[in-house]
Image (cartoon, rainbow, N blue to C red):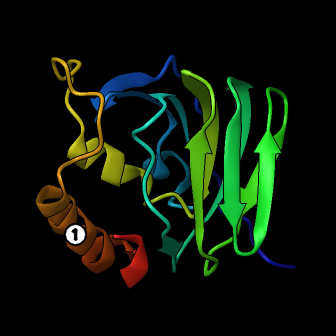
Amino acid sequence: MTATKFKSPVATAGEIRWYNGAQVRFLINPEDTEGDFAVVEITALAGIEPPVHVHQNEDETFLIHEGEVRFFIGEKVIEAKPGMVVFTPRGIRHAFKIMTHAARYTMVVTPGDFVNFFREMSTEKPESGVIAPPAPEQFRVIAQHLERRYGVYFPQNSL
Protein backbone atom coordinates (compact mmCIF):
# COMPACT_ATOMS: atom_id res chain seq x y z
CA MET A 1 0.00 0.00 0.00
CA THR A 2 1.31 3.45 -0.93
CA ALA A 3 1.25 6.22 1.65
CA THR A 4 -0.67 9.31 0.63
CA LYS A 5 0.67 12.76 1.42
CA PHE A 6 -1.66 14.73 3.64
CA LYS A 7 -2.52 18.15 2.32
CA SER A 8 -4.07 20.74 4.55
CA PRO A 9 -7.54 22.00 3.58
CA VAL A 10 -7.57 25.46 2.01
CA ALA A 11 -10.30 28.10 2.18
CA THR A 12 -9.66 31.57 0.83
CA ALA A 13 -11.38 34.59 -0.62
CA GLY A 14 -8.36 34.92 -2.87
CA GLU A 15 -5.66 37.56 -3.03
CA ILE A 16 -6.39 39.95 -5.92
CA ARG A 17 -3.64 41.37 -8.12
CA TRP A 18 -3.58 43.13 -11.49
CA TYR A 19 -1.69 42.02 -14.59
CA ASN A 20 -1.77 43.95 -17.85
CA GLY A 21 -5.37 45.11 -17.49
CA ALA A 22 -6.59 41.78 -16.07
CA GLN A 23 -7.68 41.08 -12.53
CA VAL A 24 -6.15 37.86 -11.19
CA ARG A 25 -7.59 36.30 -8.04
CA PHE A 26 -5.37 33.61 -6.51
CA LEU A 27 -7.76 30.98 -5.12
CA ILE A 28 -5.43 28.05 -4.46
CA ASN A 29 -1.68 28.61 -4.57
CA PRO A 30 0.84 25.92 -5.53
CA GLU A 31 2.21 26.00 -1.97
CA ASP A 32 -1.26 24.93 -0.75
CA THR A 33 -1.09 21.70 -2.78
CA GLU A 34 2.63 20.90 -2.54
CA GLY A 35 2.86 22.13 -6.13
CA ASP A 36 0.34 19.65 -7.54
CA PHE A 37 -2.00 22.35 -8.90
CA ALA A 38 -3.14 25.95 -8.51
CA VAL A 39 -6.40 27.77 -9.21
CA VAL A 40 -6.84 31.39 -10.27
CA GLU A 41 -9.84 33.37 -11.42
CA ILE A 42 -9.12 35.90 -14.14
CA THR A 43 -11.25 38.75 -15.43
CA ALA A 44 -9.68 40.08 -18.62
CA LEU A 45 -10.49 42.58 -21.31
CA ALA A 46 -10.44 41.63 -24.98
CA GLY A 47 -7.16 42.47 -26.67
CA ILE A 48 -4.72 41.51 -23.91
CA GLU A 49 -4.48 37.78 -24.69
CA PRO A 50 -1.05 36.14 -25.10
CA PRO A 51 0.12 35.01 -28.55
CA VAL A 52 0.37 31.33 -29.48
CA HIS A 53 2.50 29.55 -26.91
CA VAL A 54 3.41 26.10 -25.60
CA HIS A 55 3.68 25.01 -21.96
CA GLN A 56 6.29 22.28 -21.53
CA ASN A 57 5.46 21.61 -17.86
CA GLU A 58 1.77 22.10 -17.20
CA ASP A 59 -1.77 21.56 -18.40
CA GLU A 60 -4.35 24.34 -18.16
CA THR A 61 -8.08 23.91 -17.67
CA PHE A 62 -10.40 26.89 -18.18
CA LEU A 63 -13.96 27.17 -16.80
CA ILE A 64 -15.73 30.07 -18.51
CA HIS A 65 -18.03 32.09 -16.24
CA GLU A 66 -18.75 35.21 -18.30
CA GLY A 67 -18.06 36.26 -21.87
CA GLU A 68 -17.09 34.18 -24.87
CA VAL A 69 -13.59 32.94 -25.59
CA ARG A 70 -12.27 31.35 -28.79
CA PHE A 71 -9.52 28.80 -28.08
CA PHE A 72 -6.97 27.64 -30.65
CA ILE A 73 -5.49 24.34 -29.44
CA GLY A 74 -3.30 22.57 -31.95
CA GLU A 75 -5.50 22.40 -35.05
CA LYS A 76 -8.77 22.70 -33.09
CA VAL A 77 -10.85 25.84 -32.61
CA ILE A 78 -13.26 25.83 -29.68
CA GLU A 79 -15.91 28.52 -29.13
CA ALA A 80 -16.30 28.56 -25.35
CA LYS A 81 -19.34 30.10 -23.71
CA PRO A 82 -20.27 30.44 -20.02
CA GLY A 83 -20.46 27.07 -18.29
CA MET A 84 -18.03 25.37 -20.70
CA VAL A 85 -14.72 23.83 -19.64
CA VAL A 86 -11.72 23.79 -22.00
CA PHE A 87 -8.58 21.70 -21.46
CA THR A 88 -5.25 22.74 -22.99
CA PRO A 89 -2.64 19.99 -22.55
CA ARG A 90 1.06 20.66 -22.13
CA GLY A 91 3.18 20.35 -25.23
CA ILE A 92 0.42 21.61 -27.57
CA ARG A 93 0.45 25.05 -29.21
CA HIS A 94 -2.47 27.11 -28.00
CA ALA A 95 -3.87 30.61 -27.72
CA PHE A 96 -7.20 32.19 -27.02
CA LYS A 97 -9.10 35.31 -28.03
CA ILE A 98 -11.76 36.98 -25.92
CA MET A 99 -14.67 37.54 -28.30
CA THR A 100 -16.74 39.79 -26.03
CA HIS A 101 -15.68 43.02 -24.31
CA ALA A 102 -14.35 40.97 -21.37
CA ALA A 103 -14.37 37.45 -19.98
CA ARG A 104 -14.18 35.93 -16.53
CA TYR A 105 -12.82 32.41 -16.16
CA THR A 106 -11.28 30.08 -13.62
CA MET A 107 -8.00 28.49 -14.64
CA VAL A 108 -6.65 25.32 -13.02
CA VAL A 109 -2.93 24.84 -13.66
CA THR A 110 -1.42 21.36 -13.17
CA PRO A 111 1.22 21.35 -11.72
CA GLY A 112 0.69 24.74 -10.18
CA ASP A 113 3.98 26.65 -10.29
CA PHE A 114 3.09 28.63 -13.43
CA VAL A 115 0.57 30.83 -11.58
CA ASN A 116 3.56 32.39 -9.84
CA PHE A 117 4.28 34.10 -13.16
CA PHE A 118 1.11 36.15 -12.65
CA ARG A 119 2.19 37.01 -9.13
CA GLU A 120 5.68 38.07 -10.32
CA MET A 121 4.39 40.24 -13.15
CA SER A 122 1.37 41.76 -11.40
CA THR A 123 0.73 44.72 -9.14
CA GLU A 124 -1.42 45.15 -6.05
CA LYS A 125 -3.43 47.96 -7.67
CA PRO A 126 -4.73 48.31 -11.23
CA GLU A 127 -2.23 49.80 -13.61
CA SER A 128 -3.63 53.18 -14.61
CA GLY A 129 -4.88 53.02 -18.18
CA VAL A 130 -3.04 49.80 -19.09
CA ILE A 131 -5.41 47.61 -21.11
CA ALA A 132 -3.16 46.54 -23.97
CA PRO A 133 -0.52 43.86 -24.35
CA PRO A 134 3.05 44.86 -23.55
CA ALA A 135 5.03 46.56 -26.32
CA PRO A 136 6.97 44.06 -28.52
CA GLU A 137 10.33 44.80 -26.90
CA GLN A 138 8.84 44.44 -23.42
CA PHE A 139 7.08 41.23 -24.44
CA ARG A 140 10.37 39.72 -25.69
CA VAL A 141 11.82 40.18 -22.19
CA ILE A 142 8.72 38.58 -20.65
CA ALA A 143 8.89 35.71 -23.17
CA GLN A 144 12.55 35.03 -22.34
CA HIS A 145 11.69 34.94 -18.62
CA LEU A 146 8.76 32.59 -19.27
CA GLU A 147 10.94 30.20 -21.25
CA ARG A 148 13.84 30.17 -18.76
CA ARG A 149 11.80 30.07 -15.55
CA TYR A 150 8.56 28.29 -16.53
CA GLY A 151 9.26 26.32 -19.72
CA VAL A 152 6.70 28.30 -21.72
CA TYR A 153 7.83 29.21 -25.19
CA PHE A 154 6.44 31.21 -28.09
CA PRO A 155 6.98 29.76 -31.57
CA GLN A 156 8.89 32.24 -33.78
CA ASN A 157 5.93 33.11 -36.01
CA SER A 158 3.75 34.08 -33.02
CA LEU A 159 5.88 36.99 -31.74
Return the residue at label 1.
145
Up the image or down, 127 lies above or below 49; here it is above
Q: From the viewer's perspective, is 75 left or right of 108? A: right
The spot of residue 135 in percent (x, y) is 17, 51
In which quadrant will I find the C terminus? bottom left
Q: From where the camera sits, is residue 132 visible?
A: yes
- Comparing 144 with 7, the one in front is 144
For image coordinates 12% across by 62% down, the residue present is: 137
Q: Determine whether 107 is above or below 15 in the image.
A: below
Residue 76, compared with residue 28, is above or below; it is below
Name the amino acid type tagged 1: His
Which residue does the image show at 28% across and 73% down from the upper left? Answer: 149
- Pick whichever, 119 or 82, lies toward us: 82
**How far from the left and from the top, in percent, is residue 19?**
30, 35
Residue at x 77%, y 59% (from the top left corner) = 77
Residue 5's spot in the image, x, y percent? 65, 62
**Relative to residue 27, is residue 117 drawn left or right?**
left
Residue 9 seen anywhere in this rendered image of the structure: no
Q: Is residue 50 left or right of residue 71?
A: left
| Residue shown at 13% from the left, 57% from the top | 138
Helix, strand or loop status at disc 1: helix
Q: How many marks?
A: 1
Estimate how packed mark 1 is, as few (under 14), some (14 to 19) or many (20 or more) residues with alpha carbons within 10 Å. some
Q: Position of residue 9 (x, y in %)?
A: 63, 35
Residue 1 occupies quadrant? bottom right
